[in-house]
């Protein structure tokens, strides 16, 4: 969804600027800019917000488990 909003916004704004400066048809410029943006975004190695938040939760749980294990090991090592 962000990709579409970004493409629409940037595409339409750039198309208006280019068409007013160079006399190009807005629809043609906007179409070409959207295609270029889509191509650039598809090459990026990104994850969705949902996937990021899921992985963040997994990492937090893993960190908590690691800390508990480290504490347990320290307790066991301190025994005579």
Image (tube, rainbow, N blue to C red):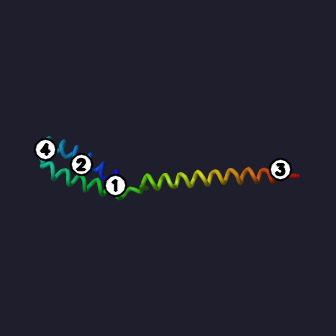
User: Disc 3 marks which residue?
Assistant: 78
Dot 2: within a 10 Å radius of its alpha carbon, few (fewer than 14), some, or many (20 or more) residues?
A: many
Of the two numbered discs 1 and 2 on the same chain, state the one appearing first in sequence.
Answer: 2
Decide: marks 3, 4 in contact (CB < 8 A)?
no
Of the two numbered discs 3 and 4 on the same chain, state the one appearing first in sequence.
Answer: 4
Write the residue at 75% across / 53% down.
72
Horizontal side of residue 47 vs 24, given as left or right: right
User: Disc 1 marks which residue?
Assistant: 41
Q: Secondary structure at mark 4?
A: helix
User: Disc 2 marks which residue?
Assistant: 11
What is the CA distance from the residue labelled 3 to the residue labelled 1? 54 Å
What is the CA distance from the residue labelled 4 to the residue labelled 1? 26 Å
What is the CA distance from the residue labelled 1 to the residue labelled 2? 13 Å
Write the residue at 14% across / 45% down.
19
Write the residue at 25% across / 56% down.
35
Write the residue at 85% across / 52% down.
79
Counting from the top left corner in percent of width and height, residue 41 is at 34, 55
Q: Secondary structure at mark 3?
A: helix
Of the two numbered discs 3 and 1 on the same chain, state the one appearing first in sequence.
Answer: 1
Horizontal side of residue 2 vs 16, given as left or right: right
Disc 4 versus disc 2: nearer the observer: 2
């Amino acid at each position: 969804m962000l990709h579409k909003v970004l493409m629409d916004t940037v595409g339409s704004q750039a198309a208006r600027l280019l068409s007013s400066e160079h006399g190009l048809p807005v629809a043609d410029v906007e179409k070409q800019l959207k295609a270029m943006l889509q191509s650039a975004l598809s090459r990026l190695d990104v994850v969705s917000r949902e996937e990021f938040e899921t992985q963040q939760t997994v990492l937090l749980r893993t960190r908590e488990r690691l800390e508990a294990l480290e504490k347990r090991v320290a307790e066991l090592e301190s025994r005579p």
